[in-house]
Image: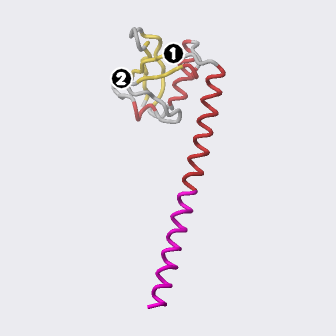
C-alpha cells in the first residue's frame, strides 16, 4: 500500500516535504529520501513519530511504527561533529564486543557448574 509521509519540523510544525513510500519502506530509506528532498544528511536526522517515539532502527519498516491513515514524522536536526560520531561508533563497538564476551563467559560458567554438580552427585551416590 502506498503511503505519503508528511515530514514536519519538530519544533515549529512547518511542513518540509512529503515522501512517497510503502509499508515496507525502511527508516533508512525514508531518511535518504528526506535528504534528497531537503538537503539534510540522513546522519543528522532524528525522526519522531506522532506518539513522540524516535524511529531508531534503520532497517525497521515504517508501516510498523507510523499510522497508516495519516503517516507523519517530525524531523529534529542534530549535526554531529566527526570526532563525536567516531567516538560514539567506537564506544558502541566496545560495548557490543564486551557484551558478547560476557554472555559467552556466563554460558561457559553455567555449563561448568552443571557438570561440577553432576560429578559431585555421582561421587555422593558412589560413596553412599
Q: Residue at x 58, y 43 (%)?
A: 96
Does the image show residue 36? no
State the predominant SS element of the stretch in magenta.
Answer: helix
Indicate the position of residue 89 as horizontal and vertical percent values: 62, 32
Q: Earlier in the sequence, mark 1 or mark 2?
A: 2
Q: Write the start and end of the magenta stretch as one range.
A: 105-128
* Residue position for label 2: 50
Query: Which residue is at the front of the view, 7 or 45?
Result: 45
Q: Is residue 101 above or below residue 4?
A: below
Q: Residue at x 55, y 14 (%)?
A: 37
Does the image show residue 63? yes
Q: Residue furthest front?
A: 127
Left or right of residue 29, residue 128 in this image: left
Label 1: state its secondary structure: strand
Label 2: state its secondary structure: loop
The quadrant of the image that shows the N terminus is top left
Q: Say the numbered circle drawn on residue 14.
A: none
Q: Residue at x 55, y 28 (%)?
A: 29
* Residue position for label 1: 77
Amino acid at each position: 500500500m502506498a503511503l505519503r509521509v508528511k515530514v514536519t519540523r519538530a519544533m515549529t510544525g512547518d511542513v518540509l516535504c512529503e515522501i512517497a513510500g510503502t509499508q515496507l519502506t525502511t527508516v533508512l530509506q525514508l531518511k535518504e529520501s528526506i535528504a534528497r528532498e531537503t538537503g539534510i544528511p540522513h546522519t543528522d536526522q532524528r525522526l519522531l513519530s506522532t506518539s513522540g517515539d524516535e524511529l531508531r532502527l534503520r532497517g525497521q519498516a515504517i508501516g510498523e511504527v507510523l499510522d497508516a491513515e495519516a503517516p507523519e514524522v517530525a524531523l529534529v536536526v542534530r549535526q554531529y561533529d566527526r570526532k563525536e560520531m567516531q567516538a560514539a561508533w567506537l564506544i558502541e563497538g566496545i560495548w557490543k564486543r564486551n557484551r558478547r564476551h560476557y554472555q559467552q563467559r556466563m554460558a561457559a560458567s553455567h555449563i561448568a557448574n552443571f557438570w561440577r554438580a553432576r560429578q559431585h552427585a555421582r561421587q555422593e551416590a558412589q560413596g553412599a
